[in-house]
Amino acid sequence: MSLNVPTRHNEKLKQVVKRINQDVELQQLWRCANINAMDRSGITDHGEVHVRIMANAALKMLRLLAEAGVQMSVEANYQLTKEDAEVIVVLAACLHDLGIAIHRDNHEQYSLAIAYSKLRELLADVYEEPERTIITAETLHAIIAHHWDQRCLTIEAGIVKVADALDMTQGRSRIPFEAGDTGIHAVSAAAIDNVSLLKGAEVPIRIEVTMSNSAGIFQIDELLKRKLRHSSIASYVEVAVKIEGETEKRLIQAGPFTAALPAASAGTERPV
């Protein structure tokens, strides 16, 4: 499966994506990660499909932030460009779960071990030194910080962390649950119908989640909300939740960011 992301006029990103799509070892590592995740651990897909969903979400969030005037960390700290930040978030999306090929537990640390050498390969001839090392270090930071309770030191890492949580539609939750389980994990995962990324009215990013059942709130609380709280982009994000077939509006409060519902039928807003 090819990684398809809108590279626009970012020539470096275009080169990196081409290399990713030609990298047989990387594609096999995604498959190995899925063997350990799905076949051996009974959790959801963490392979090629997850990478594609996450990379596109991360790239879209970065561009919404940039459009709103938010400066990326590599711009502020290293005088690099927004285009370099795009390379970082796409690479982190592609490499963040490689450690699952070794073990699901503590996979963030194992991902670093695999990702370092792979980054040097993918970035060769695309970046000269010292920029190649900067991109490598920033990508590795985004990888280790994608765990919900790991502090993000860069805007790019926060984008990657939140993008990871957005792959939760139609049973694709990042929260592990056993196959056939009818408990809250499984029911809530099945309740998420759609996740959309839009330009916000008062903040740069609006995440709209449509669910068929209020059990899906569990996914928002246990996955998206806590990742946002520990990200570097919480103040730039609003989350809107719509429960199909229900008339009441539900307002989700998750710390430093706001959440609201789109206009709908009659109802009152209240904390969940």
Image (cartoon, helix red, strand yellow):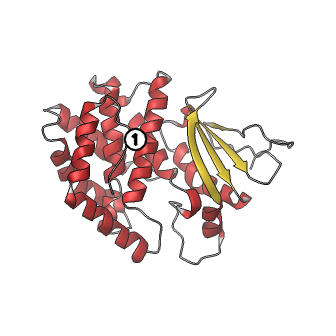
Q: In the image, 16: left or right of 193?
A: left
Indicate the quadrant containing the N terminus: top left, top right, bottom left or bottom right: bottom left
Q: In what element is the residue under mark 1?
A: helix
Q: Does residue 141 appear in this view?
A: no
Q: At x 65% / y 67%, what residue is drawn?
A: 187
Q: At x 21% / y 47%, what residue is drawn?
A: 19
Q: State whether residue 120 is above or below residue 31.
A: above
**Picture coordinates of residue 151, whole percent (x, y):** 43, 44
**Picture coordinates of residue 222, whole percent (x, y):** 59, 56
Q: In the image, 75: left or right of 177?
A: left
**Picture coordinates of residue 87, whole percent (x, y):** 30, 37
Q: At x 71% / y 47%, what residue is drawn?
A: 242
Task: Name the residue carrying label 1.
Answer: 157
Q: Amino acid at mark 1?
A: Ala
Q: Nearer the viewer, residue 218 or 226?
A: 218
**Picture coordinates of residue 71, whole percent (x, y):** 41, 24
Q: State whether residue 223 is above or below residue 202.
A: below
Q: Does residue 10 appear in this view?
A: yes
Q: State the residue lying farthest toward the right.
A: 266
Q: State whether residue 50 is above or below residue 207.
A: below
How many marks are shown on the rendered structure? Answer: 1
Q: At x 61% / y 67%, what residue is drawn?
A: 185
Neighbour class for label 1 at 10 Å: few (<14), some, many (≥20)? many
